[in-house]
Amino acid sequence: MGSSLLITAIMTGVFCAGFSVVVSQVAVQLSMTAVIAVSFVSGFLGSTVAQLVQKWRGDE
């Protein structure tokens, strides 16, 4: 479970970081580093929480 959870969470974070590059073109008041960092953390934590909830509910 641990490595699968980590790999999926990292992949989600990388996708969000890439998406943040597009978002940063709209939100020019934020630095690129801040947008990428916030997007990665948001995606990583969101994926992790979703997977844990599914695991606890037995929805695998």
Image (cartoon, rainbow, N blue to C red):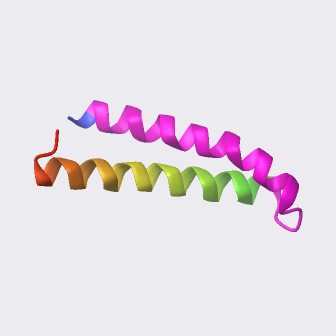
Which residue of the protein is positioned furthest toward the front in this rendering?
59
User: Seen from this angle, which residue lies furthest bottom?
Assistant: 29
Q: Is 6 part of what is drawn in magenta?
A: yes
Q: Look at the image and give the residue range highlighted in magenta.
A: 3-31
Q: Position of residue 42 (x, y in %)?
A: 52, 57
Is residue 13 inside the magenta stretch?
A: yes
Residue 19: % across, % down: 69, 44
From the top left corner, tell me how far across and down residue 31 is, in percent. 83, 60
User: Seen in the image, is 7 located left or right of residue 57?
Assistant: right
Query: Residue at 36% across / 37% down in the picture?
Result: 6
Q: Residue at x 60, y 45 (%)?
A: 16
Horizontally, residue 41 falls left or right of residue 38, namely: left
Task: Pick whichever, 31 or 22, lies toward us.
Answer: 22
Residue 14, percent across and down? 58, 38
Magenta-drawn stretch, dominant element (helix, strand or loop): helix
Quadrant of the drawing holding the N terminus: top left
Q: Is residue 44 left or right of residue 28?
A: left
Q: Residue at x 64, y 54 (%)?
A: 37
Q: Is residue 14 above or below residue 42?
A: above
Residue drawn at (82%, 65%) of the image: 30
Count the marks: how many?
Answer: 0
Which quadrant of the rendered structure holds the C terminus? top left
Left or right: 33 with respect to 50?
Answer: right
Of residues 37 and 16, the one nearer the viewer is 16
